Image (cartoon, rainbow, N blue to C red):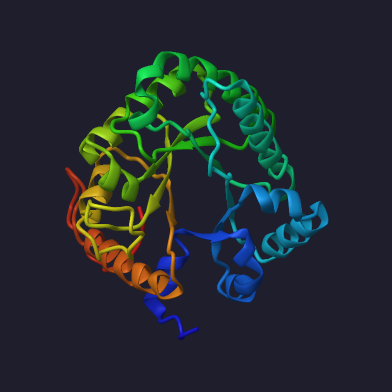
Amino acid sequence: MPELIENMLEAIKQVHVNVPWKFLPDYMNIVLQHQMNVEIGFSAEELDRSSRSEFKAAAARLSQRGCAISLHAPFWDLCPGSLDPMLRHVTCYRLQQFFDLVSVFEPVHAVCHTGYDPSHHSGQRESWVEKSIAIWEPLVERAERSKVPLLLENVWERDPTFHLELLQAIPSRWFGFCLDVGHQNSFSRTELVDWVESLADFLMEIHLHDNDGTADSHLPVGQGNIDFLYLFDLLRSRNLKPTLTLEPHKEEHLYQSLAALNAIFLKMSVQPKTGSRAATERTAQWP
């Protein structure tokens, strides 16, 4: 691992970094050394294969170093609104199994995908929403008891209305939204500002990665065509302070994203907020 230069160390304190559970042992020493905040992603197979004692051991090491934790649920092939009751049963089982980890890791958030793909499910949307609500309601109840927000992330949804419908159907301060700007840029047909404004009351986390709009490439921040300065200006103008989570798919992408974020935060630090005086000190700080 190359030396993290000072500005990267400053930026890393302000974000979570997604680390799949299968790779966490490989990166645990780096995470602990730099007190990195992590979002741990799990596959269904890992939930079956790993023991509770393994989960507890990892959680204890992270907690002892003061690393904040968020969790990401398995998502491949899960379909909360499926017309097939057996598929809904499997989905419910996996999400409940995932949520069992909340008491172990005590995360700040637990993130799930909706599983809704308009290219396949739009003809059954009303039924799909109704059936998926039956999956989410008991999970929201668990979120309320544990005081850990359950967040629904956007993937293939073309606009914010689907998330808004689900979130309004189960009103709870512990049921919120995770905006994935890479997915919004590559899959959505709706502008970023519309996503932020429509779901501002529910927005608790943002996944940060980049692409050119043609595919979900998970490029480093600044290497696609997403306007991150515009995103952060949007958030600041609305006094929104969600958790920021980087989703690098290569180790070097993490360093590149941290450097890009540091430059953005530094630029923002010398831009006055609406109605305020210009900043006099150049500190790269979010928000």
101 horizontally vs 273: left or right:
right
Please state the total of marks drawn on the protein image: 0
44 horizontally vs 264: left or right:
right
Of residues 264 and 101, the one nearer the viewer is: 101
Regarding residue 32, the answer to whether it shows in the image is no
* Residue at the right extreme, as displayed: 53
Compared with residue 83, is residue 236 higher up or lower down, i.e. above or below?
below
185 horizontally vs 97: left or right:
left
Compared with residue 185, is residue 198 higher up or lower down, i.e. above or below?
above
State the image quarter where residue 9 is shown: bottom left
Q: Give me the residue at 75% from left, 54% from top.
A: 49
Q: Position of residue 270 (x, y in %)?
A: 21, 62
Q: Position of residue 165 (x, y in %)?
A: 40, 20
Q: Position of residue 13 (x, y in %)?
A: 47, 64
Q: Give me the residue at 41% from left, 79% from top.
A: 6
Regarding residue 74, the answer to whether it shows in the image is yes
Q: Give me the residue at 40% from left, 25% from top.
A: 121
Compared with residue 103, is residue 63 higher up or lower down, i.e. above or below?
below
Of residues 149 and 286, the one nearer the viewer is: 149
Compared with residue 33, is residue 41 higher up or lower down, i.e. above or below?
above
Of residues 116 and 239, the one nearer the viewer is: 116
Q: Give me the residue at 17% from left, 57% from top.
A: 278
Q: Position of residue 38 (x, y in %)?
A: 55, 59
State the image quarter where residue 80 is shown: top right
Of residues 84 and 134, the one nearer the viewer is: 84
